[in-house]
Image (tube, grey):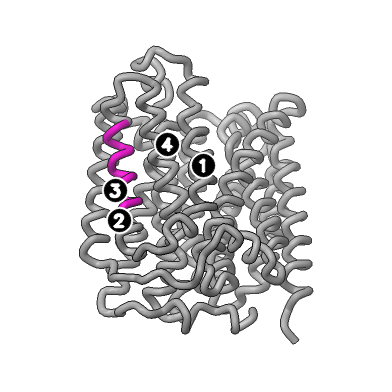
Amino acid sequence: MNPSSSPSNSLTNAPTTNAWLAITSIALGVAGLIIAEFLPAGMLSPMARDLAITEGMAGQAVTATSIFAVITSLLIAFATRNFNRRPVLLALSGFLVASNIVVAYAPSFTVLLAGRVLLGVALGGFWSMAAATAARLVTPERLPRALALIFGASSFASVFAAPLSSYLSNEIGWRNVFLAAGFLSALALALQFVSIPSLKPIGAVKLGTLFKVLALPSFTAAMLAVALVFGGFFCAFTYVRPFLESAANAAPSALTLILLLFGVANFIGTSFGGKMVEKFHEPSLWLLPLILSAVALGIYFSEAQLLLTALLIFAWGFFFGPVSVVWSTWVTQRGGVNAETAGGLYVAAIQLSAAVGAVCGGMAFDRAGPTSVFVISAAASMLSVGAVLAAVVRRRPA
């Protein structure tokens, strides 16, 4: 890692008294974003019935969120270049609260889409700034742990959002579930208000800064590696439930248990991300996708053995967990004073790769069968290994 790209001196200019409280508030904000993003997955049918639309049309609420998340993640650093970061973060969290309320009271699908667009803006903006803000709140040696806390909250939220929303929607209705999510987001906003210090903008951000960051040594290849490993993951993960049902013949109870184990493993793996960065950051960038590729192939060949499949899916979740931590740390350090722009490119790469991966996985699932998605996932992860070796190892400072 090039020490000159570290944000240690240029970004860390905030008081440290309430640093970890501020980090916690950011983690809660991220959890709120993930919960809001995943809620429709568990409530699509009742939402569609209530709004008198098809499930396919209701699913476009997710698409709208992703599109605006990509756009916002790329432009947020430039659009807010003259603003103190504290009010920007608070405004984005306010958008999250407003999104949940708008969706909860939406009288039509059009209004619901407007609420989901607000979520896309909050998601793309807040995510892009989260790592760079953390780098200004804690010392460089504590940054991996701070990011592990933030992404651990994301992982925890992703584990329970969809299944919990499915259960609660049957008990209190989908609109009240969104109101509950809005209340949680409001609590995060309140904590951010009392803990995040004033953070003046750093660096001269222009539209051309996007290309300046992409021109950094190894950055473009690194974003390709990120897109490949995340795209490969979502190619398979999007269809893991029908895979387990059709290929592994998992009973409903076994299916629920396996998915819960995956989520727990992912959370545990994320919690180890900070240690991985501290001990062997650079090797983890290519070792993790290499292991993920091997695990995906293992799942492909284990379809008839449910217990082995379950164990491999647990390993899949565990080794995917640290990926976001090690890459977000790399992006923040390499971005330097342009860490927010770098973070925006990172978020855009993930959002786009998730969409493309899900589409490719769907085509493979329909045409070649449920196990084919893991072959594609393994191939994408191996390509990510190659991109990392070209981007990081080949560029290692003398």
Amino acid beneath label 4: Val
**Is label 4 in contact with label 1 (beta carbons under 8 Å)?**
no
Indicate the position of residue 153 as horizontal and vertical percent values.
39, 56
- The residue at 57%/50% (across/down) is 348
First reached walking from the N terminus: tag 4 or tag 1? 4
Q: Which disc, if any, is residue 355?
A: none
Quarter of the image containing the C terminus?
bottom right
Q: Nearer the viewer, residue 74 or 209?
A: 209
First reached walking from the N terminus: tag 4 or tag 3? 3
First reached walking from the N terminus: tag 2 or tag 4? 2
Instruction: Give neighbour class at mark 3: few <14, some 14-19, many 20+ (Cα, 10 Å).
Output: many
First reached walking from the N terminus: tag 1 or tag 2? 2
According to the picture, the residue beneath numbered tag 3 turns out to be 94
- The residue at 44%/72% (across/down) is 202
Q: Nearer the viewer, residue 94 or 201?
A: 201
Residue 375 higher or lower than 201, as above or below: above
- The residue at 38%/43% (across/down) is 35
Callout 2: SS: helix
**Is label 3 in contact with label 1 (beta carbons under 8 Å)?**
no
Residue 389 part of the magenta-drawn span: no
Q: CA distance from mark 4 to mark 3?
A: 13 Å
According to the picture, the residue beneath numbered tag 4 turns out to be 117
Instruction: Give neighbour class at mark 1: few <14, some 14-19, many 20+ (Cα, 10 Å).
Output: many
